Amino acid sequence: MCGIVGAVALRNITPILIEGLRRLEYRGYDSAGVAVLDDGNGIKRTRAMGKVAELEQALESNTANGHLGIAHTRWATHGKPSERNAHPHLSERLAVVHNGIIENHHSLRTRLQSQGYEFTSDTDTEVVAHLLAHHYSHKPDMLSALRSTLEELRGAYALGVIHQDEPSTLYCARMGSPLVIGEGSEEHFIASDPLALLQVTDQFIYLEEGDHARLTLNSCEIWNSQNRSMTYPVQRYAHAAHSLDKGEYRHFMLKEIYEQPRAVTDTLAGLLGEDRVLTAVLGPDAESRLKDVRNIHIVACGTSYHAGLVARYWLEEQTGLPCQVEVASEYRYRSVSVPEGTLLITLSQSGETADTLAALRYAKKQGYLGTLAICNVAGSSLVREADWRLLTHAGPEIGVASTKAFTTQLVALLWLTTALAQERDRAPDMIAANIRALRGLPKLIEQVLELDGVIENLAYSFANKHHALFLGRGTHYPIAMEGALKLKEISYIHAEAYAAGELKHGPLALVDEDMPVVSVAPSDSLLEKLKSNLQEVRARGGQLINFACERADLDNGDGITHIKLPWVYESISPIVYTIPLQLLSYHVALVKGTDVDKPRNLAKSVTVE
Ligand code: AGP
C-alpha cells in the first residue's frame, strides 16, 4: 500500500527519504517518487515505475540535494501504475504526496479544470495539489491554504506538502490514513509508518484523526480539525532497528516463521501466573469488566479473521459465551444487532487496516459493552481508538504473508478465553491446562520447525499443480482456511479450504489425481470423522498430504503422505498445526519462483477500502 516519507533537516535529506522508501517497500507498491527543494533550483521531482532501486537510478541523472523534501511509494487505485501517476504531484511551486482516497475528486477536478488547472495524471491526488495552489493564491500562507483545502476534501488521506516559498517548512495532515511525526535533533520527519524512520529517530508523535501540522527544524505545531492547538507526548518506538534485517534468512517470511517461539514468549510475558492468568494488562478494573461480558463479536480481515474463527470455538466451548465472527468489510455496512453486554473484539496485525478501523468506529456507535483491539502495533490507530487493548509482541512483520502475527493473535485469544473462563469460575483444571500448554508452546513450535527439510521436499510435488484443497474440522477448519490463503497468496496456486464434513456436498467433484488435498489431522475428538472424509478423497484418486498427529494412526498407501507432528494439548493444537502450513506455502512459492515477501497485487497493510 502507499507509503509516505518527508523530512526537514540541516543535512541533505535525499538519502533519508530513499532509505525511508526502501523500508516501506514491504508494504507493496508499483512506483515511487521524490520531490526535494534543491538548493537554489526550486523543487526537483523524480519518479520511476517499479522498485525504489529504479528511482535511485533515475536520481543519478537528476541529482537533488536539499533540506526539505517528500517521497512516496504508490499502490495504484485511481489511474494505472505509471510514471505520470506516481507521486509527488506538483502544482505551481508546491508538491504533494498522499495516501488514501479522495472520494470527491471528480467534482473537485471538474471545478479546478474550469478554473484553468491542467491535470497531468489520472490520480485523485493531483486534485489536492491544485486545490492547495488555488487556495494559496488567495491566502496569506500555506497553513491557511492547507486548512481551506482540508475543509474541501472528503474521504481518507495522509498528506505531506512542501512549498518553494516556505523552504524550511514541512506540512502534513491525516484523516483516515496513518501518519506519524519523527523528532530528531534540529530536524523533523513524517512517515506513514514509524519503521520508515528508524534509521534517523526512535522518537515519534502519533497524529490523531483530523490533525494537521507544521514542522520546521526546531518546531512542531499540531492542530486538530477545529484548528485548536494540540500537544501529544513524544513516544519512544520500542522495536530495535536491527529487527528489520533479514539476517541469515533468505526471506523475511522465513525469518518471521522462525521467530515464532520468541514472538509467543514475548506475547505471553507478564500474562501467566502459576495457575491463573494475570488480567492486569487489560486495566485496573479488568476483572469486573470481564465478568460483565455476556456476548462476543469479533471483526477482522484476512488472516486476522481466521484467528477470530478459531477463537469462536475456544470461547463458546470454554466460557459458554455466544460468539460471532465477521469480516470487517461486510460488518461495517450492515445493521448489526448487539445484545446487551456484548464485547467487540477487533484483530489486526497492523492496526491500520481501513475496513477493520471503520468497523471499530461503526461499532462504537452501536451500544457495545466495550471495544477491545488485539494488535501488533502499539501506536496504531486501532489501538488508540479502542477502549481496551491487548498487544501481541510479534515484532515488526515485513513479509506480506502474515505468519508470526497470526500465531501471536491466537495466543492472545486463547489467553483471553482463559481469562473470561477464570472470571466465570469455569473448571480450574481447564484453566491450569491452558496455562501449562501456553507455557510449553514455544518449545513445541521449535520442534515442529524441525520438519522444515521434509516439507521442503514435499513442496516439489506442487510445482505443476494449479489447484489444491485444504481440509480440517473444528478449530482446525480455520487453520485449513489459513493454509489455503497462505498458499494462494504467495505461490499463486488456487487453493480452497473446506470443513472436511462438507466434502461430499460439492467439492468432492473436483478431486482427481491432479488435485493435492492437504488435511490437518490432530489427534482430537473429531479425528475419526476426519478419517472417513479422507477415505472419500482416496477413493477418488486424490493425492493426500496429511499433517497428522504421530498418534493419529491414519491409513498408509499409495498417494498418501503423512507429515507427523508431536501430540499436543487440544487447545493449542491449531497454533502448532499452523507452522507446517506456513512452511509448505513458503517452499512451494520458492519452487514456483514467486516474490515471496512481496507477492504480486498485494500490500502489507491495506489502508484503503
Ligand atoms: C495475510 O497473509 C494477509 N496479508 C492479509 O490477509 C492480512 O491478514 C489482512 O490484510 C489483515 O491485515 P491486518 O491484520 O494488518 O489487519
Image (cartoon, rainbow, N blue to C red):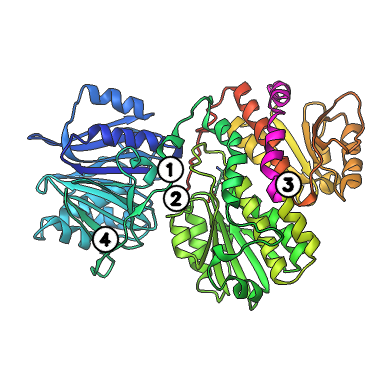
Tag 3: residue type?
Answer: Pro
Left/right placement of residue 337 relative to residue 110 reads: right
Question: Is residue 447 shown in magenta?
Answer: yes
Residue 252 is situated, as x and y percent measured from the top left of the image, at: 52, 32
Q: Which of marks 3 and 2 is nearer the N terminus?
A: 3
- Depicted 277 relative to depicted 448: above or below: below
The amino acid at mark 1 is: Met
Residue on which disc 3 sits: 574
Q: In which quarter of the image is the N terminus?
A: top left
In the picture provided, is 141 more to the left or to the right than 368? left
Q: Report which residue position mark 1 lands on.
A: 1
Q: Where is residue 149 in the image (x, y as percent from the top left)?
A: 23, 59
Mark 4 or 1 closer to N-term? 1
> What's the residue at 42%, 55% (across, down)?
379
Q: What element carries label 1?
A: loop
Q: Are marks 2 and 1 in contact (CB under 8 Å)?
A: yes
Which one is earlier in the sequence, the residue at label 3 or at label 1?
Answer: 1
Query: Residue 368: horizontal and vertical position, in percent?
Result: 57, 74
The residue indicated by pointer 4 is 150
Question: Mark 2 — residue?
Answer: 607
Look at the numbered disc 3 and give the secondary structure of its residue.
Answer: helix
Q: What stretch is highlighted in magenta?
A: 438-464
Kind of residue at disc 4: Leu
Quadrant assignment, res 596: top right
Q: Is residue 71 above or below residue 232?
A: above
